[in-house]
Amino acid sequence: MPWEQQESGGAEPARFVVGVDVGSTVVKCHVYDRAAAVRGSSCRKVESLYPRPGWVELDPEVLWVQFVCVIKEAVQGLFQIQGKFLNSVTPWLVVGRASPMFVPVQETMRCQTQERLEAEGRHRSTLIYRACGAIQYYLKVETTSDCLVPVLSHSGTGSTLPGDSLAPKSAGLHMRQIAGLGISTQRATFITWHKRTGKPFHNFISWQDLRSAELVNSWNKSLLLKVIHVIFTVLHFLTGNDRYLAPSFFTFSTQQASMKLSWVFKNIPEAEEAARKNNCCFGTVDTWLLYRLTKGSVYATDYSNASATGIFEPFTKCWNPTLCNLLSIPMSVYPPVKDTSFNFGSADSEIFGVPIPIMALVADQQSAMFGECCFHPGDVKLTMGTGGFWNVNTGERLFASRRGLYPLIGWKIGKEVVYLTEGCISDIGTSIKWAQDINLFTNVDETAKMARSIVDSQGVCFIPGFQISVNDPYLCASFTGLKPSTTRSHLVRAILESVAFRNKQLYDTIVKKVHIPLQTIRADGGVSNNSFVMQMTSDLINKKIEKPANADMSSLGAAFLAGLASGFWTGKEQLKKLRQVEAVFEPQKDLEEYKPAMDTWLQAMKRSLNW
């Protein structure tokens, strides 16, 4: 039913929450009802830029347009005409092809003839006309030099117009029906901009970016860092305080924002000058989107995003002044840090037509954890998307960094602060996408079947290294063990096996280092749809793994947090009742059956280090 008819009945219109996930590969938006069912959705591919080898950037304006568009598409539907985005609820008259003007068309208008258009001086016009009723009809008429050319007669709801972009699934709502917006974002991707003008000094620098690799390597080998390790090791020994344990193990990583932010101030004079004059703003993706949504009136981030930058101290819950002094980064550049589920203000009414409450900002992995309802200590979330992330809920206890694992703030809601321990592995979805790009398979759904069509990989091993290895930024991506008999199925199986082997490695580290009994393991992310990877991982760790019905947990987690802040949902107990499990993978093979293949893979991994 069109939203106009819903509102005319006099009853209070139904309310919904929106969760947006700005990931590394796609921007997704889902509209959820009170049962957490998806009522509308849309996604756009994130276009990464590679200006130099190892550099990975995002255009902030492109990302902003994509963010706004997926929300409009999912909520009310959207058309793209001549590069401009229009909502499909209102009919539009597009005047002029070279520099089109967009004018709302009144409901009383009817399809106009060529003569009337010419009489009104509307040469070279395009008319989009929508009739009333459940079925929407569109008439698109374009002009050539001397005549009108009809290019489309009509379109039923849900079909695609030639040359236009229609939302995959529009909820058909009005923006006034949105009770709250929750935003989940990729972490440690950041931008800096001028405080007064709002103009960025550079593109977003992605968490995948390697421009700081040499700087990271130099610092990690430096005498100063060794001295810091010794000092804090002694302090930890004398006091037993875990706050001193983290610096005793601390090493820099290319994934962290700290070294890349230091690089910005060393290499972009405008940013350095603005920082000296307290006119520079630093922001991760969430901060930038909030700033844009509120037309610059709100500048903030949340605890989950801040804790993932590598600059925020989770023990003291503040930006780390010692680290900033060490890297010559002024403290004035950082935003205030707010609760995760919180009223951040409203989107300016010019953007969506009405002010929409922004009720949650959250980092993507923490958001997926919340969406999986991993609310209790020992609950484990495994996300397999662009990269792989294992997160353990450690409750009120903050575990210090240990090799391969690091502490994060999961979320802060009022007085409740939930901590996580995280370990990550790179190049999961990236490797599979690359294999598709070089035509190892056509559809990603084929891969599990291809892997099962052969007994083993015939000794072929795949070593991922397209992005980053936390321990070795110079790890080389490679295939080893290739033979004349190697087929595409062997290559695909080797890629999928590498995901499961790395899951096993990280799980073993978690069991050894995190002294909390592990409870339920829940998986999400696009690669969790691969039954071969899921079953092999379950076999290797000898644990049951649950997969939810909806793998887009980051969007759901953001919506849950926004719904709690807006009163849409009452509490976590209600959220747990909304969770739906699609599949459960239980161990079927003994670990010993995989030992020869994993031993071979570990040997191949060693040969790919320090390339």
Image (cartoon, rainbow, N blue to C red):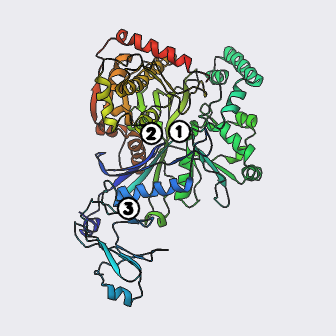
Q: Which is more N-terminal, label 3 or label 1?
A: 3
Query: Which residue occupies the extreme top position in the image?
Result: 592
Residue 365 position within the rendered picture, expressed as x and y whole percent measured from the top left: 47, 36
**Which element type, helix, strand or loop, lies under badge 3?**
helix
> Which amino acid lies under the numbered mark 2 shown in the image of this protein?
Ser
Mark 1 highlights which residue? 304
Residue 395 position within the rendered picture, expressed as x and y whole percent measured from the top left: 47, 28
**Which element type, helix, strand or loop, lies under badge 2?**
helix
**Quick check: marks 3 and 2 in contact, CB under 8 Å?**
no
Q: Which is more N-terminal, label 1 or label 2?
A: 1
Identify the residue shown where x is 45% and y is 77%. 96
**Quick check: marks 1 and 3 in contact, CB under 8 Å?**
no
Mark 3 highlights which residue? 175
Mark 2 highlights which residue? 367
**Quick check: marks 2 and 1 in contact, CB under 8 Å?**
yes
* Distance in Å between CA atoms under marks 3 and 2: 24 Å
Which part of the image, by quadrant, shows the N terminus? bottom left
- Residues 210 and 188: in front is 210
Identify the residue shown where x is 52% and y is 27%. 477
